[in-house]
Amino acid sequence: MSHRTVLRRELTPAILVAGLVSFVFLSAPCTGADETQPSSYSPVVMREDFDQTLARMEAAKPPIIERQAALLQDRYDLSDQSAKDVTMSRGKPVQGGVRVKLPESVESWTALGAMSPEQIRQKAAWPKGFLPLPHPNHAEGGMLFPKLHIDQIKKQEERDLTRFDLDFDLPQHFLPEFPPPIYLTTRTDLGDVSHGQVVGLSNYFKLFNGILNPKQLEGVRLLVTPFPQQQFNATDDRRSRKPSTGVTCFDCHVNGHANGATHLVGDIRPQEFRHRLDTPSLRGVNIQRLFGSQRALKSVEDFTEFEQRAAYFDGDPVIATKKGVNILERASQVHFMAEFQAILDFPPAPKLNVYGMLDARQASEAEMRGQKVFFGKGRCDVCHPAPYYTDNLMHNLRAERFFEPQMVNGRMASSDGPIKTFVLRGIKDSPPYLHDGRLLTLEDTVEFFNLILETQLTEQEKQDLVTFMRSL
């Protein structure tokens, strides 16, 4: 053995210890530590015990909630105003109208749409509701669930997803219906196989035995099994009062769809540049080729494995080891989970033909006009071609053309970068919109893209476009 090899073996433990000390002292301030310089890592060793953390963060909670509530009120009309005669698949009213507030200096959306990006930027006329939406506490981040879901899981499984430091921010009427139905590509004759229930460990077998094959059934079991996660685990730096068994895939993607649960993307540093994450639906993943709003994971298997190895722990494999990362076996468990996800179907769209276009014999005049705008002046089909209304690509909208970079509640509002094209089939069932949920209604979404794409749609064209998308 060479002198160099011996020296390397003697120095390695010392280097590891020194690295760990630096890692602890350069950690984020969410545990009470002073941040001396930015670090890519989360803290491993806590500087205060759990009771101190609990007391400190509970005391800090009310002003944090008030600050986020003020931001939402400043940006949006949050009133409950449903669109006429439009509901989601199980009957929940769809919210209507443009909810993003115009700047006082702008007369109308038409006037804003006539301005160039340079003019909007120079006049600071970009609506605040079109800026990136911060996490309710962006400096802290982490998984956060709507109260309706928290209450149901507590009742159904006696598992508590309440965070002692934070509450969910968006009103329930802007979220998907709960619980959402489940449609299967393999058994379209059955309709909603959830029968109005939230699928969990207590009922998955009864609901799916005899409908799924053994691999798919095991996949469902894994998708509803709780595993440790950054905020919900058994360590002293969790964000639940009691040690937790963790979260499930279907806590965010409830019934293979979505419930509005939010998080921060794990693949950006520093913290203020991380994007809030609006949980997308898993419906129709069989026709998708990109997963993760920005990560561009190439298969649902990659997505499934990556989520539990990294995204559950803010993209930090070091802290994942401490908190109890669940390492899935790729050839069986990951495959089983992916096989079930791949048969989750879109809700029925009876007015669409096999090409994904409207059947003129069933569609209304407004829907037909909206389809013409979608595939014409609106340029929507450039990224959202029929029949599934996605091109399975990434696109950079360059929204930063319209505003100066600015810090908003701990979130640096700047460029979003490339974002995957989300599927528009069944879109009325999946509010809020865009990758971070900043757009509360389809009307907001049309106004946003009218500016981004500089299409200068008329008010009638905008209304018809929304009507068409609700038929998808």
Image (tube, rainbow, N blue to C red):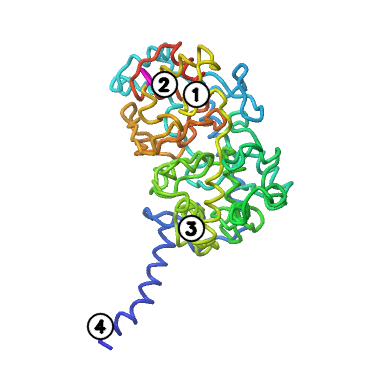
On the rendered structure, is 63 left or right of 25? right
Q: Which residue is mark 1?
A: 469
Q: Earlier in the sequence, mark 3 or mark 1?
A: 3
Q: Which residue is mark 3?
A: 309
Q: Earlier in the sequence, mark 4 or mark 2?
A: 4
Q: Main secondary structure of the magenta part?
A: loop
Structural distance between the alpha carbons of marks 1 and 2: 9 Å
Residue 26's spot in the image, x, y percent?
40, 58
Q: Earlier in the sequence, mark 3 or mark 2?
A: 3
Q: Nearer the viewer, residue 81 or 121?
A: 81
Q: Which residue is mark 4?
A: 4
Any part of residue 182 in sight: yes
On the rendered structure, is 360 left or right of 255? left
Q: Nearer the viewer, mark 3 or mark 4?
A: 3
The dot on residue 155 is: none
| Quarter of image, res 333 | bottom right
On the rendered structure, is 224 left or right of 296? right
